[in-house]
Image (tube, rainbow, N blue to C red):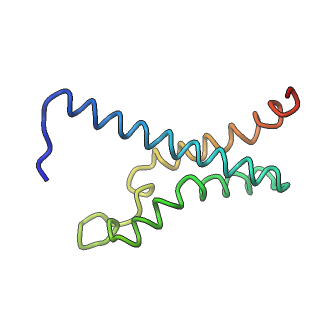
Amino acid sequence: IEQPTNPAASLGTRFVRLMDYIGAALFSVVGTQVAGDAGFNLVGCTLVGCVAGLGGRTINNMLYGTSSLLKQMPGVFWARNWYYLAVAIGSSLATFFVWPVYCKKM
């Protein structure tokens, strides 16, 4: 599909990518909260947060073939663009340390 090259289209592409990062971060936050309430440690909470934040799109990529070798796009999206994994890990770590402080104040 041909992509427009005007500045407005570039702004739209960047906005969609930003919303994608925010979505991954929010799902990671929720996964970390659930794991923390279950009594997991730092590593467990981060792992559950990353699975929650990245798992749905990973399964979607695998089921619909957007990560196939036929399309010259090997691997899943977070292996091709490491920013997604960094966002998921960062939001999970921040939630692990900030969420208990927030709960004590409430």
- Relative to 82, say whether 102 is above or below: above
- Residue 29 % position (x, y): 65, 44
Quarter of the figure with residue 99: top right
In-image side of 105 versus 94 (left or right): right
Quarter of the figure with residue 11: top left
Quarter of the figure with residue 39: bottom right
- Relative to 62, say whether 29 is above or below: above
Rendered residue at 57%/47% (across/down):
88
Residue that protrudes farthest toward the right in the picture:
104
- Residue 72 % position (x, y): 24, 66
Rendered residue at 32%/34% (across/down):
14
In-image side of 62 versus 72 (left or right): right
Rendered residue at 61%/41% (across/down):
90
Q: How many marks?
A: 0
In-image side of 61 versus 9 (left or right): right
- Relative to 10, say whether 39 is above or below: below
In-image side of 18 versus 13 (left or right): right
- Residue 94 % position (x, y): 68, 37
Instruction: Give the position of the C terminus as an image quadrant.
Output: top right
Rendered residue at 23%/67% (across/down):
71
